[in-house]
Amino acid sequence: MEKLDELKRHVFFEFLNLTGRALIIVNYSKDLIFGKRAFTQSEKANGITLAFNSKMDFIWDEDGIKATLIFGSRPEKCLIHSKNIAVIFSPELGAHFIDGQAGKMHSPFEKTFKKKEGDSGEDFNKVIEVDFTKNRQRGR
């Protein structure tokens, strides 16, 4: 788990350094600290998206991300454990990191490539799906 936490931290700071911001999707957990703010039912089911920028004052240490985040106009002291971070993404880079062990989460870019009724399908046809779970034997 420690290596995965290090990887998440590395990806987060790479996105932050390259673009000035990084977004995360955090899965609900009772051990998260969000000040007095409670998760909505939708956030409990789907997670909450949080944006961090390079001008913010926060620390990512062995406990996770410690920051005072503003919800509406109210600042809340927060602690977000690495294990609860399901997705780290950068819309500017079109890149994301998904922790499949953090729960059922989907790519924040998934909607971009879903074919909708009436679409030409051009974007959808650019997606290549690879199944790494199949074990092919060569030379038979």
Image: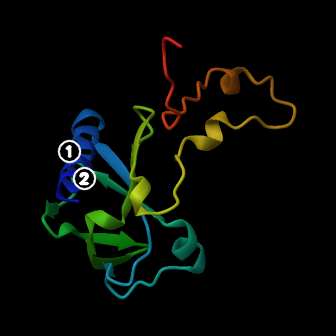
Give left or right: position of 19 versus 72.
left
Residue drawn 30% across the image and 79% down it: 76
Residue drawn 35% across the image and 71% down it: 70
Question: How many tags in the picture?
Answer: 2
Count residues near mark 2 (Cα–Cα under 10 Å), then give few for <14, some for 14-19, many for 20+.
few
Q: Image quadrant of residue 60?
A: bottom left
Count residues near mark 1 (Cα–Cα under 10 Å), then give few for <14, some for 14-19, many for 20+.
few
Which numbered mark, 1 or 2, is in the foreground of this view?
Answer: 2
Query: Three-letter amino acid code at disc 2?
Result: Leu
- Front in this rendered view, residue 78 or 124: 124
Most extreme residue toward the right is 118
Image position of 42 with respect to 13: above or below: below
Query: Three-letter amino acid code at disc 1?
Result: His
For disc 1, the marked residue is: 10
- Front in this rendered view, residue 132 or 94: 132
Residue 4, which numbered label? Answer: 2
Image position of 3 with respect to 137: above or below: below
- In three-dimensional space, the C-alpha distance between marks 1 and 2, rounded to whole angstroms, equals 10 Å
Give left or right: position of 130 versus 82.
right
Question: Where is residue 56 drawn, in percent x and y?
Answer: 22, 57
Residue 35, which numbered label? Answer: none
Question: For the N terminus, which image quadrant?
Answer: bottom left
Question: Where is residue 33 drawn, in percent x and y?
Answer: 30, 81
